[in-house]
Amino acid sequence: MLELTVHAGDVERISPLVVAPVPAAALLTGAGAAGDMALGSGPVGGQSEGGACLLRQGGAGTGAGATSETGTVVAQYDPFREELSFVLPGTLAPGSSRQFTVVEDAGSSLPAAPFPVALVQKLDRVEFRVDGEAFATYNVLGARRPYFWPVLGPSGASVIRGQGTGEHPHHTGMGLSYGGHSEGGSSNIWSDWDEPPYGPGGRMLHRGFRRLTSGPVYGEVVQDLTYVNAYGHPIVDEVRTIRCWWTSRSARYLDFHFHVLNARDRGPQPFLFMMRLPGSFDVPNTGRVTNAINRPVPLPDRHDRYYRAAWVDGSGPTGDPPFPPPAAPPETLVDQPGAPRPASGPGSGPWNGIALFDHPENDGFPGTIGKYAVVQQVTQVHYPPPRAPQGPFAFRHCVYVHDGDAATAGVASRAAEYAQPCRVDVKTTPEVV
């Protein structure tokens, strides 16, 4: 029998994603037919279905937040990393623990998971759908770098903006940029300019997917990229992993692992994770940007715009949800006399937000917020570590899409959970014959 004990540590957990190291041999031995199901299907280098198994909560656990209630939870197994993942239901108080065992007689009739994630690959993008509902689109072709747009909040409207809207219309969506404005000689894969003063720029080239995994708990993209400079010379090779899960309809997550295999460009080589907030947020007039150090954004004197913080959040009233493709050419819709103009000012929909978490394992943590910033933009920068300036090195970020503002959504607490994951004890108990 395979037993898991989840420990909260000194952080309160609200429906956390629990990741437990479980060797495949232990799962197969301890779970019988359930273990076979958990291994999933699909080849490396293609689309696959994450394996599933059933966990039963049992025992009283320990601590003030322990519970003797029983119930079942669907878990997902990754045979490549040998990890078992599931969303722990409810709240786990600091200092408490909860116990689970793998159900051996679950058979093939597992209960439906609350938020299964399906990845749909198109020619130029991957769509993330959760419980049959559109959530996010990862665009990998047709731009200087891959980017996310839209990313839908609980209201159904995007919490990041697309192309051609607001100030800096050349900054699009959410994703990783590189090089800044070529300071220090690093290649510009940031500003989408072809000509000086910022161009010519380089590109991040999508080379292919190692794996696209759909599953009952999370969906995951593993991608190979090569960065090239303005002359087409390769300067960076990267393996990117993006994992998506929801813990509720008002708590949606995208987790990013950037593994840089080598970096052979000039200059300081900044890697910049960027999010452009939608115009409907109307920051700072209506919406707001908050952060871990309670620093006002923008400062009254508009100076010293850089600061270091473990998390930053942008929130505001949402606008209209994404529309279906237009029925007429764009010039007919916006350029003709009497055509309606694009909406501006604050949205009229519910208040939603999006937060960016830095990880304490990143070199230079917390990274600098606000590089090249205007208040409608959230950017966090990291540089190659001094111990490995040309690689390999890695850094991580998590994006939390939520209902309400940062205080209502408990952004500070969710960032603390991300920085300090649950500890899980795994034990295989021999069967008694």
Image (cartoon, rainbow, N blue to C red):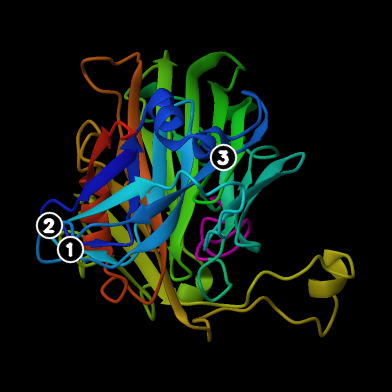
- For the point 26% across and 36% down, the residue is 426
Residue 50 bears which disc, if any? Answer: 3
- For the point 85% across and 76% down, the residue is 336
Q: Magenta stretch containing residue 69, yes or no?
A: no
Compute the Cα span from label 2 to label 3: 31 Å
Spot occupied by residue 210 in the image (x, y as percentages of width and height): 60, 25
Left or right, residue 264 beside residue 412: right
Earlier-in-chain disc, 1 versus 3: 3
Compute the Cα span from label 1 to label 3: 30 Å
Spot occupied by residue 179 in the image (x, y as percentages of width and height): 42, 31
Q: Secondary structure at mark 1?
A: loop
Q: Magenta stretch containing residue 171, yes or no?
A: yes
Give the residue at mark 2: 62
- For the point 53% across and 76% down, the residue is 155
Residue 307's place in the image compared with 32, above or below, is below
Give the residue at mark 1: 66
Spot occupied by residue 110 in the image (x, y as percentages of width and height): 56, 54
Q: Is residue 291 visible?
A: no
Compute the Cα span from label 1 to label 2: 5 Å
Residue type (three-letter) at the residue carrying disc 1: Ala
Residue type (three-letter) at the residue carrying disc 2: Thr
Left or right, residue 427 beside residue 105: left
| Residue range highlighted in magenta | 159-172
Of tags 1 and 3, the one toward the viewer is 1
Spot occupied by residue 346 in the image (x, y as percentages of width and height): 49, 81
Residue 382's place in the image compared with 24, above or below, is below
